[in-house]
């Protein structure tokens, strides 16, 4: 599911201009050359990360950058008013995208894999070929199913469907729990935090906050599910994940004073920006059109190092 999907989507009309802001994207090389912090760069030379704070796909890349302890500049993209520069970087017009050494990359998992190849230390894969296969299989199967089911339940306006859709999610969480348990935890593949965790977590975060709020969905509980709950806590305690979940006003100085984001927790923020989804695809598409027609709220969001 994508904000750009033909199924129609969009964000809360009044939150949209703020959540996505307006950004004038500048070419990576130019940005970096003028960066005052260039000398701080540790292992990377010139990474520019195009993000949208609400986006689970972009969050995968954000977490990967953190895990690899890379320095990067992050730009918040206004998905309702995409700049020509951004569209040159991301052909499909989606976040995440990164620019490294003057070349652009998009598609979340491909970006994560690119970072893994370009910066092998602090690997996000198990060492063995078999382990790598299992991580990739997980992402293609369970993580993919979770992504699909999150949006199915969120968009659905047919209350009669809710029990079945919730059961589908329960089945996925049963599999996640089983995987953590059989690997010995605390992560999906044992003691190593891998791309399987990185690819899965952003959707779990939205299930908890957004489906919890709009559909009354709760993760399965009870002793049998303690591996799952411990996994959530352990993942959320990682520095890389914490950075990606900071409330907007803590991430961007420019947002500190804005009424929508003042004193908003991460879950309040997610609930706000996904509200239009919860009203269904038609309403979501309508709000998107409105947002596209509206004047961008900000000309540009701050660049920032993590
Ligand atoms: N398959 C893509 C999906 C990315 C995606 O759908 N991103 C959304 C934001 S969550 C987007 O940029 N949508 C473009 C739009 O709304 O115009 C990936 O994994 O990177």
Image (cartoon, rainbow, N blue to C red):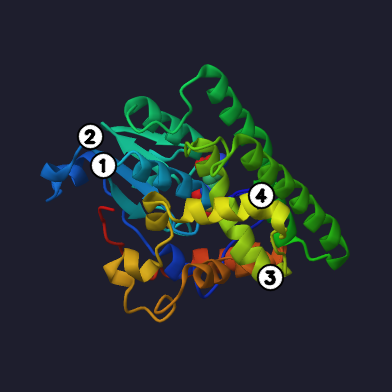
Mark 3 and mark 1 in contact? Answer it, CB < 8 Å: no
Residue 61: give its label. Answer: none
Query: Which secondary structure, mark 2?
Result: loop
Residue at mark 4: 6
The mark closer to the camera, 3 or 1, is 3
Residue at mark 3: 214
Q: Earlier in the sequence, mark 2 or mark 4?
A: 4
Residue at mark 1: 28
The mark closer to the camera, 3 or 4, is 3
Q: Is residue 108 above or below residue 6?
A: above
The mark closer to the camera, 2 or 4, is 2
Mark 1 Cβ inside 8 Å of ligand 1: no
Mark 3 Cβ inside 8 Å of ligand 1: no
Q: CA distance from mark 3 to mark 1?
A: 39 Å
Q: CA distance from mark 3 to mark 4?
A: 23 Å
Residue 87 in which image quadrant: top left
How packed mark 3 is, by other alpha carbons closer than 10 Å (few <14, some 14-19, many 20 or more), is some
Q: CA distance from mark 2 to mark 4?
A: 40 Å
Q: Is residue 230 above or below residue 250?
A: above
Mark 2 and mark 4 in contact? Answer it, CB < 8 Å: no
Residue at mark 2: 43
> Can the viewer see residue 298?
no
Q: Earlier in the sequence, mark 2 or mark 1?
A: 1
> Can the viewer see residue 43?
yes
How packed mark 4 is, by other alpha carbons closer than 10 Å (few <14, some 14-19, many 20 or more), is few
Q: CA distance from mark 3 to mark 2?
A: 42 Å
In the visual, does 199 lie left or right of 157?
left
x then y, percent, for residue 277: 65, 64
Rendered residue at 55%/72% (across/down): 13
x then y, percent, for residue 289: 57, 64
Query: Which secondary structure, mark 4?
Result: loop
């Amino acid at each position: 599911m994508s904000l750009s999907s033909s199924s129609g989507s969009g964000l809360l009309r009044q939150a949209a201009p703020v959540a996505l802001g307006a950004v004038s994207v500048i070419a990576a090389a130019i940005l970096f050359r003028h960066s005052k912090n260039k000398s701080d760069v540790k292992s990377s030379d010139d990474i520019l990360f195009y993000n949208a704070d609400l986006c689970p796909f972009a969050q995968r890349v954000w977490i990967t950058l953190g895990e690899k302890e890379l320095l990067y500049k992050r730009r918040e993209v206004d998905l309702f008013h995409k700049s020509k520069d951004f569209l040159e970087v991301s052909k499909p017009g989606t976040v995440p995208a990164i620019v490294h050494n003057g070349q652009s990359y998009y598609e979340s998992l491909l970006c994560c894999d690119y970072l893994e190849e370009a910066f092998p230390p602090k690997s996000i894969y198990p060492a063995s070929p078999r382990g790598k296969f299992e991580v990739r299989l997980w992402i293609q199967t369970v993580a993919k199913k979770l992504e699909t089911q999150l949006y199915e339940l969120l968009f659905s306006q047919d209350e009669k469907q809710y029990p079945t859709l919730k059961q589908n999610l329960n089945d996925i969480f049963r599999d996640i729990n089983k995987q953590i348990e059989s690997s010995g935890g605390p992560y999906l593949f044992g003691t190593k935090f891998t791309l399987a965790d990185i690819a899965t977590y952003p959707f779990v975060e939205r299930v908890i906050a957004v489906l919890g709020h709009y559909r009354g969905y709760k993760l399965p509980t009870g002793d049998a599910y303690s591996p799952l709950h411990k996994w959530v806590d352990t993942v959320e305690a990682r520095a890389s994940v914490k950075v990606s979940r900071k409330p907007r006003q803590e991430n961007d100085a420019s947002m500190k004073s804005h009424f929508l984001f003042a004193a908003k927790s991460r879950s309040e923020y997610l609930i706000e920006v996904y509200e239009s989804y919860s009203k269904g695809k038609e309403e979501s598409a309508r709000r998107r059109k409105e947002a596209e027609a509206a004047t961008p709220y900000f000309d540009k969001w701050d660049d920032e190092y993590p």
